[in-house]
Amino acid sequence: MKFHVVGSNGYIARRLLQRLNPDYTVVSYSRHRCPNTIFLDLANPGDANLSQIRPDDFVVFLAAISSPDECHNHYDYSYQINVTGTAQFIEESLCRGARVLFFSSDVVVGACRASRDESMPVHPIGEYAQMKHLIEQRFLTHASFKVFRLSYVLSREDKFMAFLQKCSRENIVPDVYDALFRNVVYLEDVIDAIIALEKTFSQWKTPIFHICGLELLSRKDLAHIYQAIVDPSLRFTVSIPDSGFFDARPNIIATKSLYFSKLLQRDPTKVSDALKQEFLKV
């Protein structure tokens, strides 16, 4: 059995590859031309060499144009990547007998203040959410297809944490939005869930997993936790974006999962504990 990691230069994929090597045989795919990586341009997925995908292999599909603004402003190209090319690659993988884990997003769930689990109806907001939902719906009934709907994925390398680290180093006072609320999930929990799903794939009747933490937090909340644990000297201001910012994204998505803790065989990691592991671990 091989792991096929599609979008291998991405944020989650880099940590996944660190965990998989050297215990698993891994095949990487990327639009970046790298050593030991199969070139894949989802604008022309038929050009990629997929001959290594065999029955019972595990395809972790992480590639996407994930910026809601990019999907809004460059819709046709984003659709080609996120829907047309993605569907073609997944279809070919399933035809070759592989199991596919598709990475979707909590934006498919839509704006909600009361927590919504995998059994509840969804209301995708924005082009990015609609594209992810199209892929979910196209393959949802296939026994070898599963979906991880990600909330905000936290680590020292995520964009917001990297931004706070830069501000700490350079003694900058950042302006932080107090408007986007998500059930923040630790990156290591995401990686644990991927590996656990590969081992237990056939045991799960559900095709969809909400990959989310237990705490609904804004960027301001995260900045306060970072300040308390990593850098007490950090100072920041707080603002709310103008209404146009929410054209392509909901401000509050409260999610919960019927399955995530069962998949992990434990509760998701608390944000404070995640930051300790990321920044204070010796």
Image (spheres, grey):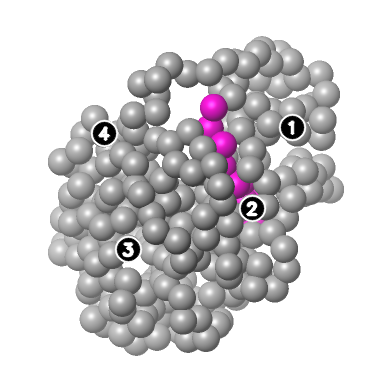
Give the residue type at disc 4. Answer: His
Report the side of 171 relative to 17 (left or right).
Answer: right
Residue 42 seen from this side: no
Give the residue type at disc 1. Answer: Tyr
Residue 55 seen from this side: yes
Labels 2 and 4 touching (C-beta < 8 A) = no
- Give the Cα separation between the discs numbered 3 and 2: 22 Å
- Give the Cα separation between the discs numbered 4 and 3: 20 Å
Residue 129 place in picture, x, y as percent = 34, 47
N-term-proximal mark, 1 vs 3: 3
Q: Residues within 10 Å of mark 1 (few under 14, many from 20)?
A: many
Give the residue type at disc 2. Answer: Gly
Secondary structure beneath label 2: loop
- Most foreground residue, 93 or 175: 175
From the image, tell me which residue sits under label 1. Answer: 226
Residue depicted at x 27% and y 41% = 127
Report the side of 82 relative to 227 (left or right).
Answer: left
N-term-proximal mark, 1 vs 2: 2
Segment tinted magenta in the rendering: 179-188
Residue 271, placed above or below residue 72: below
